[in-house]
Structure formats: C-alpha cells, structure tokens
Amino acid sequence: MRSVLRNRILLPDVLGRQKGCISLGVKGKDLEEVSVRLQGLDYKEEIVFDDTLSCVPDTFYLKLQGTFPLDKVDMLDVTVDTKGKEGGKSQVVFSNLEISLDGVPVDSFPLRTLPEFRLESEKLISIQADFGGTLQCINELQGKKIIGLGESVHYQQNIDRLVFRLMEEGIRSLGCRLLVFELPIELSLFCNRYISDPSYVIPEHISDYRKICESMDFFNRLRHYNAHCPPESRVRLFGMDYETESPGRERSLVRLFDFLSALNEEKAVPAADNLSLMFYADKTLDALNYLQSHRQSLREVLTEDELLCMEHILSFNVKIGKDPVERSLLRDWGMAENLAFLENRFAGSPDSKVMVNSHAGHLNRVSAFPIDNYRSTGSYLQEKYGELYAPFLLLVDNGSFQYKKMSGETDTWKLQCPYPESPEAALNQSGEHLCYYALGKEDDRLTLSRSLGASFSWNYCQFYPFNLYRRYDGVFYVKGDVKPVSPVSKTPEEELKITEELCKKALLVIQHRKAMADRIKSRCR
C-alpha cells in the first residue's frame, strides 16, 4: 500500500515572525513508514528550506511534529507519504493537521491579500481573428524550438479553439511540423494515422474518447493540409502522456492491440497477428523483443513512425513498471521523456519546431502545483532544452468548462468571475478580445490566477497563487463567451442509469476486443 497526499498553503504575512510549528496525528497497522515533507517557498516559488519528519505508527495515535523557519517563506508545501508493509493489510488514519506561527494557530490570521496584476500597454499585442502573422511579431517566440501552450482550464471551448488556431498559425508562419498533446502516446497513434492517411477511419470506440472527439474538426483541417503538401512538409501529431490509471500498463498495451489488430484485419500479416496477441496478453517484454526482430515484416502494416513509437512505448512501460502509484508520481517526468523522444525522432533538425499543448500546471517551468507539488514537465524541458524552451499561459476570463464526474459522465459548469487582482480581470478590462501579453521582471511576484484540471467539484477553488513571470514567457488571452450555465441536477436513479449505460458501452468494447483476439488466434493456428 502506498498513499501520497500533497498540498500547498499560502501563509499569512509572516514579517517579524521567527518559527512555524506543524503537527499531525497518525495511527495505523502494517505500516513501514509515514513521512511528512515540508518545503518552504518564497515569492519566486523557489525552495527556502526542505525538511522531512518520519515515524512508524502503531494502533494508537501518535503526534508527528516539527518546526520550520519563517524567514523569506511565503508558502508551505506539505507532502504526507505513507508506505505499507509488503504483503500486509495496511491501514492508516490521520487526525488534526495543525500549523502555528510563533505559537499562534495559522487559522487565526487574516487571509493574505496579493497585489493587483497591472498591465503595461506597450507589452500588449492585439491579435486579429485570422492571426495574420502575429506569431512572427512576438519576441519571446523567436529562436525557440519547443513552444508550450499551457491551458489554464481543461476542456474550455474558447481556449481549445485558441490552441488550434495557434497551432495552425505555427504551421504556416513558424514552420512547425510536430504537434504534441496531453494525450496518451499510444492513443495518439490513431490520430496521427488519421491526419496522414486519407483512407483511414478511427475506430468508433476510440473516436468517442473525449479529447479526440472534441478535436475532430482540427484533425480534419490537418488531414486536408497533409493531403495537399509534399511529404517533407507534412505535420505529425502525437501525445506525450501515458496511461496512469490502474491498471496503467495493461491499458497501454490494450490500446496498441486495438490499433494494430484493426490495421491488420484485412491484410492478416502473421507477424502483426503475433504481435497483436502479445499486446492482448500483456506480454510487454516479449512484444518489445518480437517487434525489434520482426521489423521488416511489420512494415507491411505499420509505418516507420508507428514502429518507432511502439518500440518506445514498450521500452517505456518496461522501464516505468506496473505500480499505479509510481506511474502516477512519475507522470510529469514521463511526459517530458516522451516529448524528448518525439522531438529527437521527428523534429531533430536545428530549424524544426514543436508545439505542445497541455495543462499549464504541466508545461510551466516551476512545479505542477496546483495539480500536485512535484516537478512539472516544463521544469524537465527547461533543464534539457534551456533557452530553446518557451512556455506560454493561455487564459480566459469568463464562460464555462466541462469536467468529468465520478460516474464518468461529462457535465458543464461556469467559471468563477475573475478576482480583481488577477491577470484575467486585468485583461478583461483591456477591451481586447484576443491578445498576447509579454511577462516582465515587474511581474516577478505572487499573483492569483485560475487553474482548473479535468476533474472538478463545484466547491473547489479556481484561483491559486503563482509567480507567472517565473513560470511562463508570456500570456495569450481570449475573451470568453458569457452564457448562463445551469447544471441540471439529477436524481440518484438518473445518475445510476447513466453509469449503467457507460458500463454497457465499455462492456461492448471489451467483447469486441475479445472477438477480435479470437479471430486472430484462429488465423494463427
């Protein structure tokens, strides 16, 4: 058993205060260790101190406690890591996380107010609806190889459209030929084949995948572009993410089975059949060895791009293992590894450019907060590519967004009105419908800005403290569509019916997959 809980706390004004104290009650059984890691951060989101408290709890509550300095500390990262004994039936219970500053409970202090974000008109560039070569006028884009488009809100229509328009302009004016999304790399094989092969049809259960379904108009425009340009100018589209939900590795290989088995259904190439069955049986290492030794035969079904990606996916799964907690904790590192592979294989020449779309929490240079407190994908990219990496923040002021409920159903909710101190509010007041704003040293401070991921509950916070200057090179802003959103509350019976329909749909996919595997087995006898 492994459990990791993380949170970041914006401390009140601690000027003149000397010492903080933290305590946590914990008990459990069959535990190897419980540790609490404390990291103090300054206004730059840089670590001022780093300390770890640990204990081995028993069935009676004990208090894990320690002190920390307050000098130059603006925020506190707390990570509670619980490890159970191998083979044991581990249990853990936490109680009363308490923080005090010079003996005064932190909850007794007033909430900290952050300074207002102020625009400087000379750093703002208006963007016309057709973009009209705007990207070539942005200094922060010049000489960059990896361009990160970090969306502040997942599944927000205005931001999604902005991403597609930026990428299309990047193809036209910057010569970008590799597009990368926050999509499992194995799932992106379907997308890249679709935009590259005019005769290819994405299987129905794959086209229903949320990100793919909502991107089909964009994919069709890329498909048309690729069909009317020489091979050396064609665009590739891949994902940099990987399957983290349990069982992650099995889900990864199942995607590869779906892709290869459908392509080979008519050709029935024996090597492709054998490899498909290894995918279906979750034989990762066997599949990797077989692919490497049967490359020539597999080229009858797969392109060289697809073979390279499959080999990387299998090698990556061998390296990262099966443990779902480890796969989740390593996610940002893994996305950086996948992106580095794609850049090396498909955009290795010095003048090649890559445009990457993901949540801003992943693409910024500092950390994955508020998604989590660990290192971000962008911090790894900064380490590898240095000045060749440029992350940008994509903001919207108002409107609505979609989120996934626990039942698996997608629902719509409204965005909170921007806080008066936020860049969203400042850009809303600028009168611009679409613009770019360059971040400068005067923005080197904490400010409130929005961040929403794919999962959401109505009472979750939407605005968090960030140092935008340290995280991004600039901001693209689009004015949101102000439409009233009234989420329809459903009865438990209606929720249950929706869940049952989703389960039936999933079962049909499993049955179709098994039938495909049975047909392949019969051919291989």
Image (cartoon, helix red, strand yellow):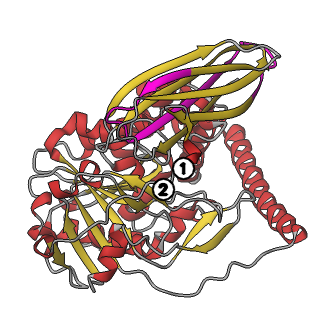
Q: Which amino acid does label 2 sit on?
A: Phe
Of the pair 48 and 149, the residue shown nearer to us: 48
Query: Where does residue 265 sit, x and y in percent of width and height?
Result: 59, 52
Numbered range of the magenta stretch: 66-93
The residue located at (46%, 37%) in the rendering is: 76
Q: Is mark 2 on a helix, strand or loop?
A: helix
Residue projecting furthest to the right: 493
Residue 190, label in figure: 2
In the picture, which quadrant includes the N terminus? top right
Q: Is there any visible trace of residue 229 in the rendered image?
A: no
Figure check: 506 above or below 245: below
Q: Left or right: where does residue 401 sit relative to residue 357?
A: right
The residue located at (50%, 47%) in the rendering is: 371
Labels 1 & 2 near each other (Cβ < 8 A): yes
Q: Left or right: where does residue 169 sit relative to residue 282?
A: left
Q: Is residue 89 found inside the magenta-colored segment of the image? A: yes
